Image (cartoon, helix red, strand yellow):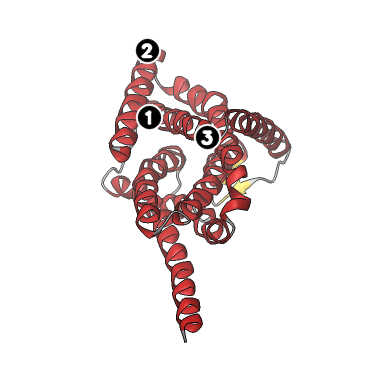
Amino acid sequence: MNSVLSFIAFNNTILNVFIVAMITALATGLGAVPFYFIKNISSKWLGYANGVAAGLMLAASFNLVQEGQQYSLWRTIAGLMIGLIFITISQKKLSERNDLHIGALKGANALKALLIVGVMTIHSFAEGIGVGVSFGGGDSFGLFISGAIAVHNIPEGLAISLVLIPKNISVTKAMFWSIISSIPQPLLAVPAFLFVEAFNPYLPVGLGLAAGAMIWMVFSEIIPEALKDSKKENVAIIVTIAIAAMVIFQTLLKA
């Protein structure tokens, strides 16, 4: 009887891990909500929007590196280099395709949209492992970490929306792509929970990989895009303010 009850309790825990991780993924879609109330974005504000996206992504990448260092400095650095190599090769291969499109987007716009969603998806792999590993330390700790990740996902969804919506992607589709970028979280949370010891060594690599890809994306695609539409001084100010706001936000989550 005890073994049956233990089996049921264990299965309930697995289900809870999946449900909680799915909620963290759905939270990413909330980042698109403000755009239901913002109808038109001028070219100047488009540059500012890209500046905000760049700042949010840079701050998130700094946080990933810092978190990875707590596990292993060199594995985090190795992951960062892998992320850099991966995103560079991916961009080169994708740019060679003339038939590339996402919805109504084609060519360079489709490439940028695909890269931003791809980079955030890479990021979500590490977060999914983080959710699963955290539940290995108990339900209360797992819920705390998952809650922090869910709230943290909202500005990441905002960053995705800031890049997609000005390129004529609808708000609903931007919300959809934001959630899709976080789907690896529920998919990896359960295996990471079941095999905590096996996944732990790869967590800093995953965190570094996501950081490397995000940093490349910011300086290769988003910042140049922002500078085409707005003055460099204004873009620099907005990027700095966005980084500061995200750092404060992340610090409050950990308090």
- State how far apart marks 2 and 1 are (Cα): 14 Å
Q: Which residue is drawn at 54% across and 36% down?
A: 71
Choose top left, top right, bottom left or bottom right for residue 251. Answer: top left
In the image, farthest residue toward the top? 233
Q: What element carries label 3?
A: helix
Q: Of all residues shown, which one is farthest toward the front?
A: 2
Helix or strand or loop: what does disc 2 sit on?
helix
Of pointers 1 and 3, the one earlier in the residue sequence: 1
Of 178 and 80, the residue lying toward us: 80
Disc 2 or 1, which lies upstream in sequence?
Answer: 1
| Disc nearer the start of the sequence (2/3) | 3
| Percent position of residue 16, x then y | 42, 67
Q: Name the residue under label 3.
A: 68
Mark 2 is on which residue type? Glu
Residue 41, horizontal then vertical, whole percent: 34, 35
- Residue at point 59% right, 58% down? 195
Relative height, residue 78 to residue 14 (above, below): above
Which residue does the numbered mark 2 point to in the structure image?
A: 233
* In this view, 140 is above or below 82: below
Provide residue 109's location: percent of width, then percent of height: 55, 38
Where residue 104 appears, x then y in whole percent?
Answer: 54, 49
> What's the amino acid at mark 3?
Gly
- Mark 1 residue type: Val
Would you place residue 112 above or below residue 133 in this image?
above
Q: Between label 1 and label 3, give the one nearer the viewer.
A: 3
Nearer to us: label 2 or label 3: 3
Q: How crowded is mark 2: few (under 14 residues within 10 Å), some or many (20 or more)?
A: few
- State how far apart marks 1 and 3 are (Cα): 24 Å
Dot 1 alpha-carbon crowd within 10 angstroms: few under 14, some 14 to 19, many 20 or more = many
Which residue is under mark 1?
Answer: 52
Q: Residue at x 34, y 17 (%)?
A: 237
